[in-house]
Image (tube, helix red, strand yellow):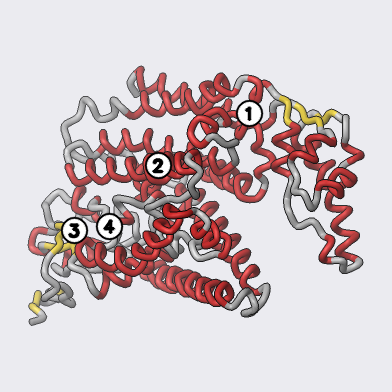
Amino acid sequence: MKTIEKIGLGLFLIGLTVFTAVPFLGNYTLTEELVLVNTKDIHREKMAEILAPMYGQEYGSNFSFLSAFGENFNTYNDNLKAQQHWDQVIWDDYGFALSKAAASSPVRENPWLWLGLSIGLAVLGGYLYNFRQYSDEPSGIKNNGIFHSKLKNKGWLGMITGGYLILFYILLYWFPAYLVNLVWMVEPVSRMLSGGPASQWFLYGLVYTLAILVMGVRMFRKYRGNQYQQLRTASVMFFQTAFAFLIPEILVLLNQPYYDFKNIWPLDYDFFYDYQISTFLSGGGMGMFMLIWGILLIIVGVPVFTYFFGKRWYCSWVCGCGGLAETVGDPFRQLSDKSLKAWKYERWIIHSVLVLAVVMTVVTIANYFSGFSFLGNVTNQLHSFYGFAIGSTFAGVVGTGFYPFMGNRVWCRFGCPLAAYLGIVQRFKSRFRITTNGGQCISCGNCSTYCEMGIDVRAYAQMGQTIVRSSCVGCGVCSAVCPRGVLKLENGPEENRIIDLPIIIGNDSIKLNA
């Protein structure tokens, strides 16, 4: 490892250590004024009464503060539930808002300093580590020693990395009150972009975007001899930075609804929720444009673009989930399961999620237009279940946390309903395919090894069979790592696009299946 790479790795580890330590800094003191300011009108008087025993006390950590908060708040709600006074139960979770308001720490006093010492050093270290990689080697994709790496071969370092990511996502989705110091750290950035306070989602969006940008540099270095890989890496970096992060924040600054113009239903599963529709309708001309734009993408954009370019136009060039998988997750792409058993599970699971998303959306729309008389509270229960099981657990905790265990496209392969929708169009009505020249295949297995979607590409190549799998995201890495030029990504006429078993290889002969 070169000196500059060692320095970069050292800076990254220091930044990551500071980032991990920040949530434990400072103390917490709650006052009645803070409770009144940070709770809803209908709950202020009661919340001020419930939390009165905490006023004026100093808590040395967020653990002790949240423990005391939970004891008082949950006791009140549990008594009401025991008496079945459901209308008096406070269902809102004020833990995050009150923890953030009650926090007193060096991070809150000097957010720019701590932002620089944590995220800043991690970004700088990551850049220094990546920008000179492969500089002394000729162009060509290098995967040397990848199965000897403790990070990339399910070794102890990979286990630690996966565990860290899983823990972060669990805290982010279900226990954000423990991350309030990290949120205070990015507060000035949020104020600068949107004019409003930071939340755990702004923290996540910032870290997510910077991770793609830093690891995108690694992609440029690793695939510097391949123009296709360079262009699609630049594309996902642009769409994540501009469309997923900056534009939605700037829209809020301009008093417009927060909206990611590249997010499409059913990946954007709450697009038809009643509160979202109300936001669009109350947003004037811009809100109406967002609503129409989203609907047009679903019924026109997806079929048309997928017909001409395959699902790669979105999954490998635009999508934020795909962007993270292709940059941060690239070192783990060889860990995807290529077995037929995994393919069977993949098809059942991902299409089940799509069906669930469609059913939930139909029920939601029907309930909205019936004045919420259709199935009553069932809609909210469906929303809660889908948000917890799919939106949080599957897409977040498993989808990213399992990179070091199951490869970088776990969510895209097994869970993303939009990928399922795109895949159905790609399989049956698209010009996209990967053509193979079986006569040139030497069965090295590089294509299958580095297919992030778990496709046994070599099996198709050996038979000279065109690849039209619905799961293929057209990343092009199989073609890039092939030493013989056997594989080629193409958009061509639909005629003869699907040819089943053109070559049969047996023990005694090779026959053409004509």
Amino acid found under the numbered disc labelled 2: Val
**10 Å neighbourhood of mark 3: few (<14), some, or many (≥20)?**
some
Instruction: Give the CA separation, mark 3 to mark 4.
Output: 26 Å
Q: Secondary structure at mark 2?
A: loop
Q: Which residue is mark 4?
A: 312
Q: Which residue is mark 3?
A: 443
Front: mark 2 or 3: 2
Mark toward the start of the polypeptide (2 vs 3): 2
Q: Whole-percent x and y of residue 423?
A: 32, 68
Q: Whole-percent x and y of residue 190?
A: 53, 34
Q: Which residue is mark 1?
A: 21
Mark toward the start of the polypeptide (2 vs 1): 1
Q: Whole-percent x and y of residue 424?
A: 32, 72
Q: Nearer the viewer, residue 268 or 414?
A: 268
Vertical placement of residue 374 versus 446, above or below: below
Mark toward the start of the polypeptide (3 vs 4): 4
Vertical placement of residue 81 versus 168, above or below: below
Q: Nearer the viewer, residue 63 or 464?
A: 63
Amino acid found under the numbered disc labelled 4: Arg
The answer to whether residue 466 is seen in the rendering is: yes
